[in-house]
Image: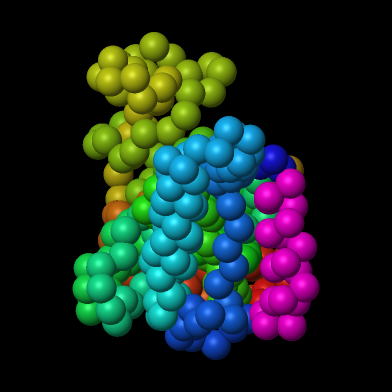
Amino acid sequence: MGDFSFALRQRISDWIFRARIPEQAPVVLTQKRIFIIPTRTGYFFAFVLVLLLIASVNYALSLGFLLTFLLASMGGMSMLHTFRNLARLSISPGRTEPTFAGDIAHFHLVMHNPGVARFSVGVKRAKLRDAEPTFGDIAPTASSNLSLSMMAESRGYMPCGRLEIFTEYPVGLFHAWSYVDFGMTCLVYPKPDPGAGALPISATGNGEGNVPVAGDEEFQSLRAYRAGDTLRQIAWKALAREQGLLVKEFGTTTSADLWLDYAALVGFGVEQRLARLTWWVLEAERALVPYGLKLPGRTIQPSMGRQHRDQCLERLALYGVEGHTP
């Protein structure tokens, strides 16, 4: 019954909303947009009502008729309240912050309630049968932010897809739902590679700034263990904190601008190069080193700051996939 209900909702959504992507915000859930069908509990409740009615007719039970029609009227009222729990909600997309591959992307919906309180309003991905929903209550004449979490598996733009807004309040006999699709996307940066280690010495050029170089004078950073590293280099405290087997890197600093060059990473695949460049962008920002980025066909001049960091990470995320950018 659950599979049939899910398939039925999908066919309705494909038929009704096939020409509405992306939708213009805000979307108001009017009567034409809200659908409602019985849940598994609702079908069982209807089956029990039929049995009560048959027994009341066969045995001429006046109290049986009273109980049957009383329960039927309660079921009808629950359907009305389930519908009203969604009716006239105004929905808009919220801001989606970029994330890194392998982390969680958060898509936000802002729901404005113009009337009485709404309870147990859920949001989930419409195309997934076992998608994990997010629930929330919305106070009268107030707005609420519902966040839907999804795993960011690869770099580039991650689409949110069609979302199902639903409720089974108050007693779970009926499932009322509607769909929205604002074409929301989340920018996913490449996953940083800690194995890249300290900032590359050969990437320095003319300019001002403190760039780490190899040496044994002061601690620079931690990197993943590689075969051949000595026991003296292992970060035992990090291992005790269950952070994995990491190795300390030491060095000193020199004054220069730093160039992170894609072409200089010979012998690595595309994704490995991007992962290492991502790690170095984060390391350079942490060390307050002016850095530039060189990619095939695109160069970003050395600078620092949040805006510069985001610009570099965006170019790394979209490298080779710009043609697929929505």
Give x and y (percent) for residue 90.
Answer: 40, 80
Q: Residue at x 55, y 39 (%)?
A: 60
Give x and y (percent) for residue 57.
Answer: 61, 41
Is 14 contained in the magenta span? yes
**Residue closer to the observer: 41 or 191:** 41
Taking 246 as reference, is 1 left or right?
right
Q: Residue at x 47, y 29 (%)?
A: 224
Q: Is residue 48 visible?
A: no
Is 87 contained in the magenta span? no
Location of the C terminus (image quadrant) = bottom right
Q: Residue furthest front?
A: 60
Taking 93 as reference, is 235 left or right?
left
Location of the N terminus (image quadrant) = top right
Q: Is 306 drawn above or below residue 152 in the view shown? A: below
**Residue closer to the observer: 85 or 159:** 85
Taking 216 as reference, is 134 left or right?
right
Q: Residue at x 67, y 66 (%)?
A: 319
Q: Colour scheme in the image?
A: rainbow
Q: Which residues are magenta?
A: 4-21
